Amino acid sequence: MNAPHNVNLLDQADRRIVQATQAGLPLTARPYHAVADQLGLPVDEVMQRMQRMLDLGIIRRIGAVPNHYALGYRANGMTVWDVADDRIDELGERIGQLEFVTHCYQRPRHLPDWPYNLFAMVHGKTKDEVEAKARLIAGVLGQASRGNDILYSSRILKKTGLRIGA
């Protein structure tokens, strides 16, 4: 994976912040204060620099990444949908707003074997729960859905983003 072109805009302090947070923010009530203390920087500077990196697209997001398996969600299903390409932005936005959809995005079709272009991840404690959520998505899509399937996770993959070395 190539680094974003904006990565050249990082100075040494930015790189230290990325290195200190790339495995996650400290699990404390005041994580930015902990990072600032670790790096010997004012907390306002750490927060301003992180916001700047977000604005530039160097950092895509800051958020919690739960371990669904540890929370009891053993049925993790990527629902895949065949919808008209000229409606995918509108429909993807609607599906992505559903509180039980953890992420939703467009992917290219690979016809004739793979007609699906809209993907929405849902988690459940059972396959029945995932299937019920898929039916709710189908209800939102209505006639716009020309077909769908659910792909279940078979193993846990560790997800990490770009890492900057020392």
Image (cartoon, helix red, strand yellow):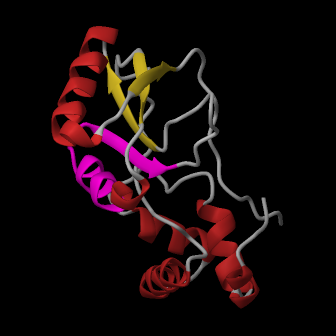
Residue reaching furthest to the right: 166
Q: Nearer the viewer, residue 48 or 109?
A: 109
Q: Is 54 displayed left or right of 163 in the figure?
A: left
Q: Is residue 29 above or below residue 146?
A: below
Quadrant of the frame with the N terminus: bottom right
Q: Is residue 94 magenta?
A: yes
Magenta run includes residue 142:
no
**Residue 130: percent from the left, percent from the top?**
30, 19
Vertical relation: 149 (above or below) 122: above
> Which quadrant does the C terminus fall into?
bottom right
Residue 126 visible at all: no
Q: Position of residue 96 (x, y in %)?
A: 30, 50
The answer to whether residue 129 is above or below residue 105 is above
Look at the picture and state if 33 lies above or below 157. Answer: below
Residue bounds of the magenta highlight:
89-106
The quarter holding residue 68 reads: top left
The image quarter in which residue 59 lies: bottom right
Residue at 64 percent across and 34 percent down: it is 158
Q: Looking at the picture, how far across and down is residue 75, in whole percent? A: 40, 16
Viewer-side residue, 128 vs 55: 128
Number of numbered callouts drawn: 0
Would residue 151 appear left or right of 114 to someone viewing this image? left
Please tell me which residue is depicted at 40% across the width and 46% down the height of the picture.
103
Going 35% across and 16% down the picture, which residue do you hit? 72
Q: Residue at x 58, y 61 (%)?
A: 21
